Amino acid sequence: GGFPGDGALFLPEFPLRFYDIVGQAPAEIADRYEVFDITSGPLKEKAEVVYALDVLEHIAPEKRRQAVANMAESTDSFLLLAGPYAGEKIVEVETMVREFVKAKLGVDHRYLEEHAQLGLPDRTVVEGWMREEGFEILAWPVAHLPHWGLMMIAHYLLDREPKNVELMERFNR
């Protein structure tokens, strides 16, 4: 999932390419953005690193194995899969954030609703798929769950106001 192209903010010196099923890329990455469904096949050109941030939980469970295989076929070096994986506490915190967004902001957040509808991927299953594709596994948590939940609430509160665009851009650098 490359939309909206925030990776370009963090790694401006690298020739990143972005792929997502969402159309209309932001102007600053339009020349490096392609609408693409990773469940349909591997990327046209191999990449040194394939990094999928918050992707698997938005793919139907029956297509996740194929997506991992296609990502693996798209690189000879590194495949990084980052995102939430199933777990009782993770589901509990995501549910609290989703309910807060609905109660306080009056919206069903698309991505959080997809997490609930599709279910989060099982990390051990995904790691098994990656081993089958020939990858070594290195896994670590990247966020303290209570802090993540509060951070997401703050994010959604700030994101709702057009006047906060510049502030949000500064936070996301």
Image: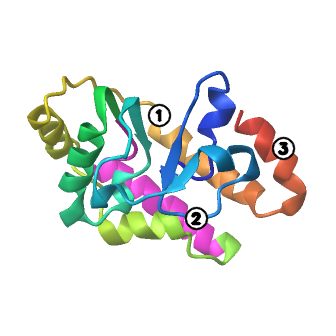
- Amino acid carrying label 3: it is Leu
Q: Secondary structure at mark 1?
A: loop
In terms of secondary structure, what is the magenta stretch mainly? helix
Which residue does the numbered mark 1 point to in the structure image?
A: 144
Q: Are marks 1 and 3 in contact (CB under 8 Å)?
A: no
Q: Which amino acid type is shown beneath numbered disc 1?
A: His
Query: Which residue: 53% across, 48% down?
Result: 2
**Amino acid type for the residue under numbered disc 2:** Gly
Of badges 1 and 3, the one in the foreground is 3
On the image, numbered disc 2 is attached to which residue?
A: 23
Q: Which label sits on residue 167?
A: 3
**Quarter holding residue 108:** bottom right
Q: Tell me the crowding category of disc 1: few under 14, some 14 to 19, or many 20 or more residues within 10 angstroms, Cα based.
A: few
In-image side of 53 versus 102 (left or right): left
The residue at the point 62 percent across, 51 percent down is 4
Separation of disc 1 and disc 2 at Cα?
32 Å
Q: Residue 171's quadrant in the figure?
A: top right
Q: Is residue 9 left or right of residue 65?
A: right
Where disc 3 sits, the SS reads helix
User: Residue 95: within the magenta?
Assistant: yes
